[in-house]
Image: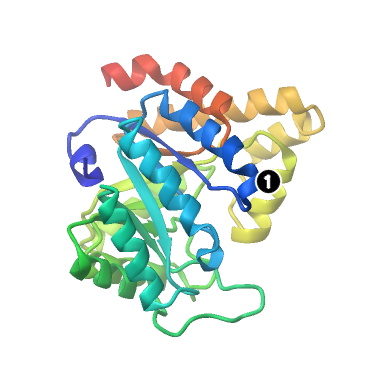
Amino acid sequence: MKIKDILGQGRPTLSFEVFPPKTEDNYETVEKAAREIAGLRPAFMSVTYGAGGGTSRYTVDIAAALNNEYHVPTLAHLTCVSSSREKVHQVLKELEEKGIENVLALRGDIPKDGRTAHDYRYASELIREIKEKGDFCIGAACYPEGHVESANKTADIGYLKEKVEAGCDFVTTQMFFDNNILYNYLYRVREKGITVPVVAGIMPVTNVSQIKRICQMSGTYLPSRFKAIVDRFGDRPAAMKQAGIAYATEQIIDLIANGINGIHIYSMNKPDVAARIQESLSEIIEQA
């Protein structure tokens, strides 16, 4: 099923992201976690794509298993900055052959060595090509706080508009910890005529090391309320996990109460975290 049709039903949806293993040795562990999350029957699941396409085979394999064996609509990530046009066409062909209808088109991070392929520079170019290659539902990323490489937030929204005009059907946000940031962002993108569904990306932070990585990579704003949780419980893993799940759950409740129906959880391959959030929201999702 295409995600644009799922999002178009006008009711709250809960979906989860998983990421493939970096090596074959870990494949079974990751596949098991993905299977357990699929057992929660989310609206859909996304499967990430390694830098430079290094885990692309695992991405396709896991996405196909979720889609065809567990009957959960699947969104396969596809990055292009380090991929040749030939590689992109190969992955799209594999996805089509395995019945996967949804692709999240991303530029991807610039490799640490700075070496990139030369066929694509921007996600909008990848989106346009996917649109021409097959009947895929295409998603894209958006950044409520602005992409770290954008000159400013206005420029960043301009890039988002280019993605939509290239043919993306919906967008998913980078993680955020203050819902007001999303509400302000939605006002601005709607004002610019961007009308595609915006899915809110939520990260349940269950350990302090996650916070450090998040801040280093994206400069995400951490509200004082969230910092207080980290300061109080950060050195007690069980308490931090419970507090992080509770914080994410409260975020989601507020989003749904304010009319944000699409919620995507960055699960970090943790079925127990996914299950606890879903259980806390079961009546809200059902009756909203």
Percent position of residue 54, x then y: 55, 63
Residue 89: name its quadrant. Answer: bottom left
Up the image or down, 122 lies above or below 199; here it is below
Colour treatment of the image: rainbow
Residue 285: name its quadrant. Answer: top left
Task: Residue at 42%, 77% (x, y): give it.
Answer: 84
Q: In terms of secondary structure, where does tag 1 sit?
A: helix
Q: Is residue 274 left or right of residue 104?
A: right
Point out the image quarter for the C terminus. top left
Up the image or down, 285 lies above or below 172; here it is above
Residue 268 can be seen, yes or no: no
* Front-lying residue, 169 or 67: 67
Residue 223: name its quadrant. Answer: top right
Task: Residue at 25%, 50% (x, y): give it.
Answer: 101
Percent position of residue 38, x then y: 42, 29
Percent position of residue 21, x then y: 59, 48
Task: Residue at 68%, 44% (x, y): give it.
Answer: 210
Task: Residue at 26%, 53% (x, y): give it.
Answer: 97
Percent position of residue 12, x then y: 29, 30
Point out the image quarter for the N terminus. top left
The amino acid beneath tag 1 is: Ile
Up the image or down, 53 lies above or below 240; here it is below
Crowd tier of the residue under label 1, counting other residues whose Cα lies within 10 Å: few below 14, some 14–19, many 20 or above: some
Q: Is residue 283 left or right of residue 248?
A: left
Single out the residue that lies furthest toward the bottom: 118
Single out the residue that lies furthest toward the top: 283
Q: Is residue 219 left or right of residue 176?
A: right
The residue at which mark 1 appears reads as: 211
Residue 185 can be seen, yes or no: yes
Q: How many dots with numbers? A: 1
